[in-house]
Image: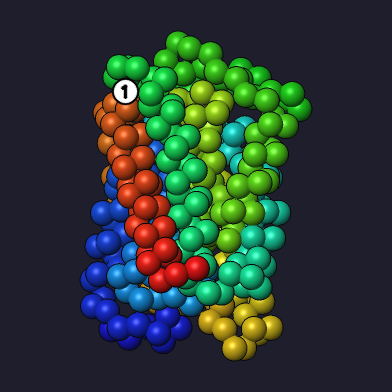
Amino acid sequence: MMFSTAGIEVAWWVPPLTAFAISLGTSMGGVSGAFLLLPFQMSVLGYVHPSVSATNQLFNVVAIPSGVWRYAKEGRMVWPLTWAVVLGTLPGVFLGAMLRVAYLPDPRRFKLFAALVLAYIGARMVRDLWRGGGKKDTGHGVVEVEAWNWRQVAFTFQGRRYQAPVWGIFVLCLVVGVVGGVYGIGGGAIVAPFFVSIFGLPVYAVAGAALMGTCVTSVAGVIFYQAIAPWYPHLSVAPDWKLGLLFGLGGMAGMYLGARCQRFVPSRVIKAGLVLVLLSTAAKYVMEFVGKGM
């Protein structure tokens, strides 16, 4: 099947099958899988135009709602965190999209940027795993919000109380929103590991909020890339709708199944799997950049 915007030809079943496999595992950690789908598109499919970021965000828009619905049904959505992610990352995503088109159209430079983002997230999660010791918890339980005001968000989960400063969450989400806008993942995918490693929140309770935030900001990202495309006629900026929808359909099934299975998987297993993929992908991109010269 030919995808004209992406400028690639691939069998129709490859995108949905790949997205299903990626989303099944990453959705358990509150990550859509777009951060892994991007290197697959660039390195395997050869899709290196700036529009790959918009296509990634289209995948988020189609795939994420099924996972969020499952987390909400099981009572594991922290809605105050969700709105904080949305309000913080949304303006950053717009700025990040402009930076991607104006300053990072070169795929080699973009890969180096992506490697730095992935490596930093991975390092934070390694530290979290190290501090976590041998804890082998599971996600059975319901979230109960206790406080939500301009100073803090507080909730209980599995009999333990958690809290985080609202302004700290907002500033963090604003910064990662810029990074997420450049990388084409909406921002929420970066926020999830930060919630776990910096604020000490349980991965079972923040996964749904991070996914929902990613979905909302990705809608804005897709609209923005589509709107600015006419201003860059020499570049492929708008999403490849056919490819994005195929990725999204596979991701929809993977995220639903991942959200359904998450509560049965120990948190350390979820985090360790994400760390392995994050650091290995970052190392691959750094080696590619160094190998081609500065």
Residue 123: horizontal and vertical position, in percent? 45, 37
Q: Is residue 225 visible?
A: no
The quadrant of the picture occupied by the N terminus is: bottom left
Q: Is 116 positioned to the left or the right of 149 in the image?
A: left
Which quadrant would residue 222 be assigned to in this image?
bottom right
The residue lying furthest to the top in this view is 159
Q: Which residue is mark 1?
A: 138
Q: Is residue 21 visible?
A: yes
Q: Is 203 positioned to the left or the right of 50 in the image?
A: left
Which quadrant would residue 134 be assigned to in this image?
top left
Residue 22: horizontal and vertical position, in percent? 31, 53
Residue at (26, 54) in percent of width and height: 21
Residue at (48, 12) in percent of width and height: 160
Residue 15: horizontal and vertical position, in percent? 30, 68
Residue at (66, 20) in percent of width and height: 147
Residue at (30, 70) in percent of width and height: 44
- SS type, badge 1: loop
The residue lying furthest to the front in this view is 293
Residue 4: horizontal and vertical position, in percent? 41, 87
Which quadrant would residue 152 be assigned to in this image?
top right
Give the number of callouts.
Answer: 1
Instruction: Answer above or below: position of 70 versus 91.
Output: above
Q: Nearer the viewer, residue 32 or 82?
A: 32
Q: Nearer the viewer, residue 94 or 145?
A: 94
Instruction: Answer above or below: position of 264 versus 251.
Output: above
Q: Which residue type does callout 1 highlight?
A: Thr
Q: Which color mode does the image show? A: rainbow
Question: Dot 1 surroundings within 10 Å: few (below 14), some, or many (20 or more)?
Answer: some
Instruction: Answer above or below: position of 232 versus 118.
Output: below
Instruction: Answer above or below: position of 250 versus 227.
Output: above
